[in-house]
Amino acid sequence: MTSSSDQVEYQRTYYDGHFPKRAAVVQEQLAHPLFRSFYDRLARLVCDRGLAGDGTTPSPSNGRALRLLEIGCGEGLLGSALHRMAAERSVDLSYTGTDLSAAALELARPSVSGQLIQGDATQVVAGLPAASHDLAVVKNLLHHLDDPADLMRAAARAVGPTGKVVVVEACLGAPQFWVFTLLAPKREKHFFKGRRRNLAAIHDGGLRVVATDFFSWLPYELAFAIRFDWFRKLLATDDRARIDRIGHIDDRLTSALRFSASYIVWTAVPR
């Protein structure tokens, strides 16, 4: 059996080799209006939930200060969208991003401002001062970890009794993620253990889910993240109306076909 430390080292080695090869693709993704819109919509959902007084109903955000911790920020795709959302809503954003891969943080650095910390997610977050953040965001990370409850416990401490943790994980019913998982079963080690494992980690980490959302049905990431640029060129548009129409269609498909949505988003508060 592979130990947790062996798995961490495997992930670190993989991603430190992976991200430098993707530098050009990441720049294209960050500049692509349609792909940016995907992350902008996710950033709005995350912050609506994070800023909501009860975790369900968005409260006015203009002029608010937000100490945001993104755990597993990768190359900065969501982080850059969180910065755009903050500017759009006049939120005074104090951003901290963490990632296991130093190479990922090098790619993130030009598109996010704030503190970037390299290291094992659980160890880094456990070392942060208690109640030092208002909102922690964890996207596509729990299924990589041998013990995600430890991370959730550390995140609950970092946001304190009045903070929130938003967890974004791929849905087991989304065929696009089967491709990633079946091609890299060791890297995506716990994906097929699904929702029950993730909810257990949230609960065992001392958190209570107060809102559940489904996000996106169209395979944005599969189409735009691959190293071949066919879809990025085919779907290149800066027509705001067209981009908004595609987003509206995506939202309607997600509502109608929740079982195969790309992501499930849990908003949780410390118990």
Image (cartoon, rainbow, N blue to C red):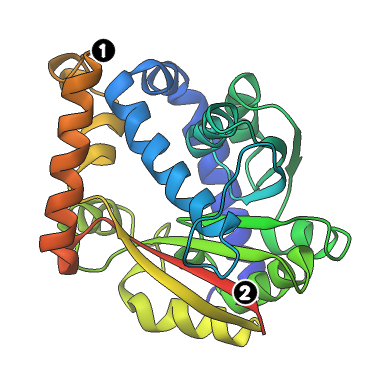
Q: Amino acid at mark 2?
A: Val
Q: Earlier in the sequence, mark 2 or mark 1?
A: 1
Can the viewer see residue 52 in this picture?
yes
User: Within 10 angstroms of label 1, few (less than 14), some, or many (20 or more) residues?
Assistant: few
Q: Give the residue at x 43% y 50%.
A: 45
In the image shown, does 235 or 44 lie closer to the viewer?
A: 44
User: Within 10 angstroms of label 2, few (less than 14), some, or many (20 or more) residues?
Assistant: many
Residue 216 place in picture, x, y as percent: 25, 50
Q: Give the residue at x 66% y 69%.
A: 151
Q: Is residue 36 above or below residue 154?
A: above
* 37 to the left or right of 47: left
Q: CA distance from mark 2 to mark 1?
A: 38 Å
* 194 to the left or right of 166: left
Q: Amino acid at mark 1?
A: Asp
Q: Is residue 89 above or below residue 111?
A: below
In the image shown, does 114 or 57 lie closer to the viewer?
A: 57
What is the quadrant of residue 194 in the picture?
bottom left
Residue 255 place in picture, x, y as percent: 17, 60
Q: Which residue is mark 1?
A: 238
* 66 to the left or right of 202: right
Element under disc 1: loop
In the picture, the disc for residue 42 is: none
Q: Which residue is mark 2?
A: 269
Can the viewer see residue 190 in this picture?
no
